Structures are given as C-alpha cells and as structure tokens.
Image: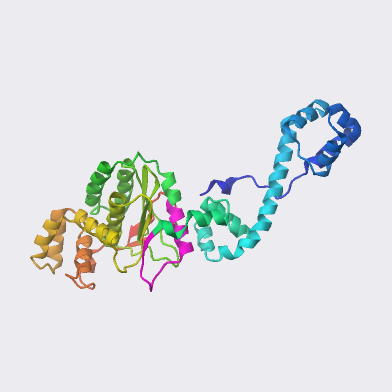
C-alpha cells in the first residue's frame, strides 16, 4: 500500500573504511603511500578507514584513479552504510514512542496488508509512521491535530481517535490513487443528480459509477470498511484546493444509511469550509452545520415539495412506499429510512424494503465488488 513497503532495507552492511583497508592490503599499498597518491592527508585516510569520516565525491574520484574502482561504487558503499547506521539510530529512538503505538489497531492494519507484522515494538513505531507518511510522532500529531476535525459524536459513543486517524488515512491513500479532474461545483451538483438515480441499481455497479461521476467533478470517493472501536458513517474533506474527498464506512450495511451518508458528506463539500475534516459519527445533538448537511441531503434525495405531498397521504404500507420510490426513481429503502428518521414510521416497520449488505471478500483499494447484498 505504501512505497516504503518496497524499499531495499538490508539488515547488515559493510563499512566503507573496511573495504578500503582490504583493497589497500590486496594491492600492497600502505595508508601513507595511498594518501600521497591521492594527494590527501594521511589523517583523512586514517579517519575514513576508522569510520570517522565519509567518502566525499571528490575523494571518491581520487580513489577511482589510484585503485581503479569506480567512484560511484565508493559513494554507494558509503551511502548504504550511512543509511544503515541512521536506521539503527531511528530504531533506538523509536523505543521512546512505543506507548504511542498501543492505541492503534496494528493487527487490523496487518490483516488489511497495509504493512507486514512488526518484528518488534520499535518496528511498530516505524511502520506506523511509514503508513501515515510522516517522519516522526510529532509530525503525526501536527498532521492529525483535533483542531482540524469537525467531529459530531455522542458523549456515550465516541470513536477511538487513533483508530479514526487510521481509517481516514486509508481513505486518503485511496483518494491519492484516484485520478480526478479539477473540482467543479456545478459538475459535482450535477453528478449528485445522476448518483441519486443509481440508488436503484445493483450496489457494485452503482458504487463504480458513483466513483466515476465524482472523479469527473473533482471528488475522490472511497468506501473503507470501519475499524474496531470506531462508529463512523462517513467523512468529507479537501486533500487540496482542487480535490475533495468523500469517504464512507457503510457500517450500518443498509442502502438507506449508505446513500444518505453519501449525500450528507456531499453537502459538506458543497456548503462548508475547505479547512476542516467533517466526520459523521453516531447520532448526537445536531450542530448548525450538521443540520444544514442533513437538510441538503434530504432535499437532494427527495424534493421537499414532493416529500410533503407524499407525507400528506400518511404512507404506512410497503405498496405506497414502493410506488413513491418508483415515481421518484430512488431506492425504496431510502424512503423507508427517511420516514423512520422523521418519526413518520416506527423503526421496526418496512425494513424488508431496505437492501442489506455484507463484506464478502478481503477489502482492497478501489474494488467495490467485496460489498454485496446479503
């Protein structure tokens, strides 16, 4: 998933000084004589052999002329050795941040093949930083500071913040993968009109077309399964000034929640500031922005005038819901969900009209086929 997973990381290396010393012995050249031939001080050659000084490019060129070994080889040996030393120091320093890793669902990340199983507690720190694309724990804290989150939640059901950042990072990686046109609000609004019609299609087809329509309007669309200790339905944010992201978890695994969450997040993209990450968790006290997003989503799914006419008939039967949904060209489950949410229908009624889903295969980025009806 991350480029760092495919980097060359040898678990041993040879110091350039020992290579130089061996080469001099093979060719029968003393350190003092070698220094004279290179035009460098005996002290510098001694320090290079002792590992106290690096082989600089100019020095490597001199070594090439005297020993017949290409300068790039000397530079390469030195660079690999220095990086190896730096990694060892990083591993030692990582030990101070082991406590930080304990809040993260590391095994879940291993299961999702985000990285291989850490071979030590210090390695967990390094692998998490690589996953997040940050160079240090301080850099991670700055990037995911709570002030950037517009997070609506219930005091009795708040997601684990570390798990939340992992879920957001998974969406961010998927968003980076998607090639989007420059964001265009008019095109995105038109896309939502087309996506509304997709709610009646088979879910895999609908999700693929939704992603395509979003991308063409400058919005990345990611469906990422929820993580343990999270209760997130969706999130919306901007990864750049010209690319927005809508991320859904589909944690309720029903079509009414899935599609309402999409339109709710779309509302944040269209109506609200680009500077915040809007996280829709569980139902709590609605803020002004959340009320706006809900109202926009409801009206986008069913025009308010049509909805009020429908409500005037006091719809209670499956037949009346199906007829209205057919007229409006949306999924009947969405109509049921809206009726229940507004208190016009008990939560236990007409749930058979909703489509229920399950995760069938291992989740991979950009693949919607793992999400299927029961």
- Please indicate whether residue 239 sits to the left or right of residue 96 in the image: left
**Residue farthest along the top direction in this orientation:** 65
Query: Residue 92 location, x and y as percent?
Result: 68, 57
In the image, residue 6 sits, relative to residue 314, either above or below, namely above
Tell me where the magenta segment starts and ends, as one range: 150-171
In the image, residue 208 sits, relative to residue 252, either above or below, namely above
Query: Residue 170 location, x and y as percent?
Result: 45, 54
- Please indicate whether residue 186 sits to the left or right of residue 174 in the image: left
How many marks can you see?
0
Q: Colour scheme in the image?
A: rainbow
Q: Quadrant of residue 360?
A: bottom left
* Residue sitting at x 73%, y 39%: 77
Q: Nearer the viewer, residue 309 or 320?
A: 309
* Residue sitting at x 19%, y 56%: 299
Q: Quadrant of the C terminus?
A: bottom left
Query: Residue 97 location, x and y as percent?
Result: 61, 61
- Does 153 appear in magenta? yes
Q: Nearer the viewer, residue 167 or 50?
A: 50
Query: Residue 192 location, x and y as percent?
Result: 25, 48
Q: Is residue 314 visible?
A: yes
Q: Nearer the viewer, residue 98 or 290?
A: 290
Q: Quadrant of residue 232?
A: bottom left
């Amino acid at each position: 998933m991350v480029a760092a997973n495919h980097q060359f990381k040898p678990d041993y290396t040879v110091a350039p000084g020992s290579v130089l010393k061996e080469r001099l012995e093979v060719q029968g050249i003393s350190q003092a004589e070698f220094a004279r031939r290179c035009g460098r001080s005996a002290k510098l050659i001694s320090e290079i052999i002792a590992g106290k000084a690096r082989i600089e490019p100019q020095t490597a060129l001199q070594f090439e002329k005297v020993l017949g070994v290409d300068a790039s080889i000397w530079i390469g040996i030195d660079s690999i050795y220095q990086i190896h030393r730096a990694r060892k120091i990083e591993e030692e320093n990582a030990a101070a941040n082991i406590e930080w890793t304990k809040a993260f669902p590391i095994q879940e990340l291993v299961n999702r093949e985000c990285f291989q199983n850490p071979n030590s507690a210090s390695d967990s720190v390094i692998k998490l930083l690589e996953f997040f694309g940050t160079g240090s724990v301080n850099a991670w804290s700055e990037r995911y500071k709570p002030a950037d989150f517009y997070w609506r939640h219930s005091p009795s059901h708040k997601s684990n913040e570390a798990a939340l950042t992992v879920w957001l990072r998974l969406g961010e990686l998927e968003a980076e993968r998607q090639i989007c046109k420059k964001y265009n609000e008019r095109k995105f609004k038109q896309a939502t009109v087309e996506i509304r019609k997709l709610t009646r299609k088979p879910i895999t087809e609908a999700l693929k077309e939704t992603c395509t329509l979003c991308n063409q309007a400058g919005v990345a669309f990611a469906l990422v399964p929820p993580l343990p200790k999270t209760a997130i339905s969706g999130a919306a944010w901007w990864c750049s000034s010209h690319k927005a992201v809508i991320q859904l978890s589909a944690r309720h695994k029903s079509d009414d929640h899935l599609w309402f969450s999409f339109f709710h997040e779309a509302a944040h993209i269209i109506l609200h500031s680009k500077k915040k990450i809007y996280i829709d968790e569980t139902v709590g006290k609605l803020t002004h922005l959340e009320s706006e997003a809900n109202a926009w989503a409801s009206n986008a799914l069913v025009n308010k005038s049509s909805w009020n006419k429908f409500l005037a008939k006091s719809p209670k039967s499956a037949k009346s819901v199906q007829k209205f949904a057919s007229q409006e060209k949306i999924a009947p489950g969405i109509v049921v969900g809206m009726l229940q949410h507004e208190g016009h229908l008990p939560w236990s009624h007409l749930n058979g009209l909703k489509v229920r889903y399950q995760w069938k295969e291992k989740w991979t980025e950009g693949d919607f086929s793992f999400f299927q009806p029961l």
